[in-house]
């Protein structure tokens, strides 16, 4: 005995397209199927890949899709872009020389052509703030790249191979974690006489890589347990191929997030060390040096301290906000 058929749903239940087909009384299933397909393609927030030319989005395309709609990312990215531009071409907005000083104008306030006033040596504060961005951004970016490269490679290898390599690296990172950063800087940089940024960058890389190493190690351990890695191993893929083609692209997101947030921290650390007199040294133009020299005049000439300190605070905040936005976009648990 044949099974009873389920009753057909009325065409009106399919929305405007269904009502249009019902009103014509012809077209049948073919027109209804076409209407359903067009409705699905035009549905906002519908699944990717439903249209003929659409493809499923990857983690990175999904992250970029979210970042473009995040006002925190947009504001922080614009601030950072501005800082990068004036770091490369400071003469675009500052035509003076940061080392051109006139003692007759020492500690004077704002004047025409000198909106931020003058410091204790008679140097234009505005010009020094603009040129100080180059030093801070250079130290922050190069330190972050060095830390991410060294810590990411060592941590990734430890997480992939495990065993004795993992045990030795874990004990080494424990030793570095026990060293206070500021105290270590006072000890290591106090014997350095160079006025360049390289000793400061080297110190930050030396004490900063263990954090990235721990993050990379845990991310690689999680990624190598996935089915696609096990399938690649069963098919005879080499260790280098599995690391570069399968594990690294799926384990690098946490490293990028932590490195982005740490970039602002390194800029603040450089200013702290320069303020204490063991970081960058004159004649290098640095916000930390200017804050240190202006701290004794805060009552008589507060503008000497407020402008470089404000620029430092905005820069650090911009990089931390950028890191938070990237973290929210790359974390699947927040979707």
Image (cartoon, grey):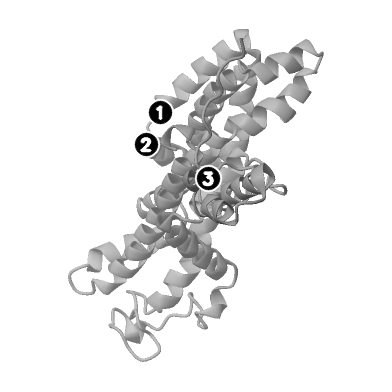
Instruction: Kindly check if marks 1 and 3 are in contact, taking CB atoms under 8 A apart as contact.
Output: no
Q: Which mark is residue 179?
A: 1
Identified at 44% across, 54% down, the residue is 70
* SS class, disc 2: helix
* SS class, disc 3: helix
> Upstream in the sequence, badge 2 or badge 3?
3
Image quarter of residue 307: bottom left
> Upstream in the sequence, badge 1 or badge 3?
3
Left or right for 61, reference 277? right
* SS class, disc 1: loop
Q: CA distance from mark 2 to mark 1?
A: 8 Å
Label 3 neighbour load within 10 Å: few <14, some 14-19, many 20+: some
Q: Position of residue 74 (x, y in %)?
A: 46, 60
Residue that numbered label 3 is attached to: 11
In front of the other: 50 or 107: 50
Q: Position of residue 207 (x, y in %)?
A: 49, 34
Q: Which mark is residue 183?
A: 2
Q: Nearer the viewer, mark 1 or mark 3?
A: 3
């Amino acid at each position: 005995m044949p099974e009873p058929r389920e009753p057909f749903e009325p065409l009106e239940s399919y929305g405007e397209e269904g009502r249009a087909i019902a009103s014509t009384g012809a077209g049948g299933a073919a027109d209804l199927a076409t209407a359903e397909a067009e409705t699905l393609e035009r549905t906002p927030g519908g699944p990717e890949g439903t249209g003929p030319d659409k493809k499923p989005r990857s983690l990175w395309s999904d992250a970029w899709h979210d970042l473009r709609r995040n006002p925190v990312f947009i504001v922080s990215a614009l601030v950072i872009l501005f800082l990068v531009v004036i770091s490369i071409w400071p003469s675009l907005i500052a035509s003076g020389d940061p080392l051109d000083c006139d003692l007759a104008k020492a500690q004077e306030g704002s004047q025409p052509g000198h909106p931020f006033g003058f410091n204790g040596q008679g140097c234009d504060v505005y010009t020094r703030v603009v040129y100080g961005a180059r030093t801070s951004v250079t130290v922050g970016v190069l330190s972050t790249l060095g830390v991410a490269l060294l810590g990411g490679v060592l941590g990734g290898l430890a997480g992939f191979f495990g065993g004795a390599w993992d045990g030795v690296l874990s004990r080494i990172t424990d030793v570095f974690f026990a060293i206070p950063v500021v105290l270590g800087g006072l000890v290591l940089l106090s014997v350095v006489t160079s006025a360049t940024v390289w000793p400061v960058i080297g110190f930050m890389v030396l004490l900063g890589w263990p954090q990235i190493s721990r993050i990379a190690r845990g991310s690689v351990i999680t990624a190598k347990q996935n089915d696609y890695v096990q399938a690649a191993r069963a098919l005879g893929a080499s260790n280098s191929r599995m690391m570069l083609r399968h594990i690294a692209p799926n384990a690098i997101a946490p490293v990028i997030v932590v490195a982005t947030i740490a970039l602002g921290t390194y800029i603040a650390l450089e200013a702290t060390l320069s303020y204490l007199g063991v970081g960058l040294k004159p004649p290098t133009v640095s916000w930390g040096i200017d804050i240190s020299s202006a701290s004794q005049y805060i009552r008589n000439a507060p503008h000497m301290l407020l402008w470089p300190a404000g620029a430092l605070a905005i820069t650090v905040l911009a990089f931390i906000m950028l890191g938070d936005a990237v973290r929210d976009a790359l974390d699947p648990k927040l979707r």
